[in-house]
Image (cartoon, rainbow, N blue to C red):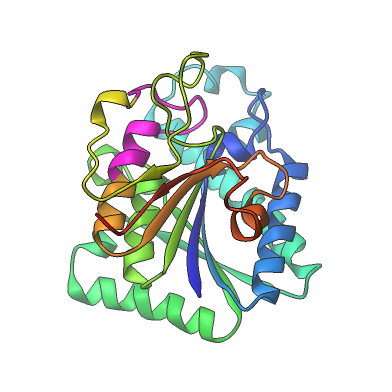
Amino acid sequence: MRITIKIGSNVLTRADGSLDATRLSALVDQVAELRRRAIEVILVSSGAVACGRSVLSHHQNLLTKDNVDERQLFSAVGQAKLIDRYYELFREHGITVGQVLTMKQNFDTPESYATQQNCMEVMLQNGVIPIINENDTVCVTELMFTDNDELSGLVARMMRCQRLIILSNIDGLYTGHPADPQSRLIRHVALTDDLHHVISAEKSSAGRGGMESKYHIATETARAGIEVVIANGKRTDILLNLLDQPDTTPHTLFSTQP
């Protein structure tokens, strides 16, 4: 089995924007266990910009403008910090990881597409986990993915995965705003379901995406024959529980069936 796991910025960062090292370590432990169960894993990880912002937090003049220059700076610093943490944590399990920084243009031409696909295929064949992120240091607005949800869907299709797991900071898709006590978690979405009317357009606090983006990517990916799960990455052992106890683990499943 081969799966893509997308880890959102709100999963990896604390309320103050700093990297949640404990959460990152717990997720790495779970991915290592999936590997021991002969499941190939591709990670699409957000968090680089948030990491960079926390490293440079003493530069107060950088924290209020949120322009392209600062995004490039935060990404350049934060990506190094993030991949180093992944490298050290996976090494404790005897697992090697490799970084793949990509851009939207890499999916636009057959040559670039095949080159990127081959790179990750070779990594997987040699037991290396690809850790993928958008190259924010050189991507500007018109060249950017909508967010890493879009990137994860493209990667799942490119690498012919059986499942895409999108980890957010809520349990899945709800019938209304998640903060509304009247809202209920939607456990199953069939291909023929249209749930646009219940989707909140609110963006996440740490990343560029939101549930609207996740719903769009999940439905597109399911139509391509890949199951999609949206779940809460802050829940203890969420990846293992999705595999071992799916009936009692809160999540939304986008089915490949009508």
Quadrant location of the C terminus?
bottom left
Q: Is residue 43 left or right of residue 118?
A: right
Q: Nearer the viewer, residue 21 or 72?
A: 21
Assess whether residue 136 is covered by the magenta stretch: no
Q: Is residue 76 left or right of residue 254?
A: right
Q: Nearer the viewer, residue 84 or 124?
A: 124
* Magenta part of the chain: 200-216
Which residue does the image show at 30% across and 56% down from the upper left? 221
- Residue 119 in the image: state x and y as whole percent: 42, 78
Which residue does the image show at 52% across and 42% down from the upper left? 251
- Residue 210 in the image: state x and y as whole percent: 40, 31
Which residue does the image show at 64% across and 54% down from the upper left? 245
Q: In the figure, 201 relative to 82: above or below?
A: above
Q: Nearer the viewer, residue 225 or 12?
A: 225
**Image quarter of residue 31:** bottom right
- Residue 123 in the image: state x and y as whole percent: 52, 79
**Image quarter of residue 68:** top left
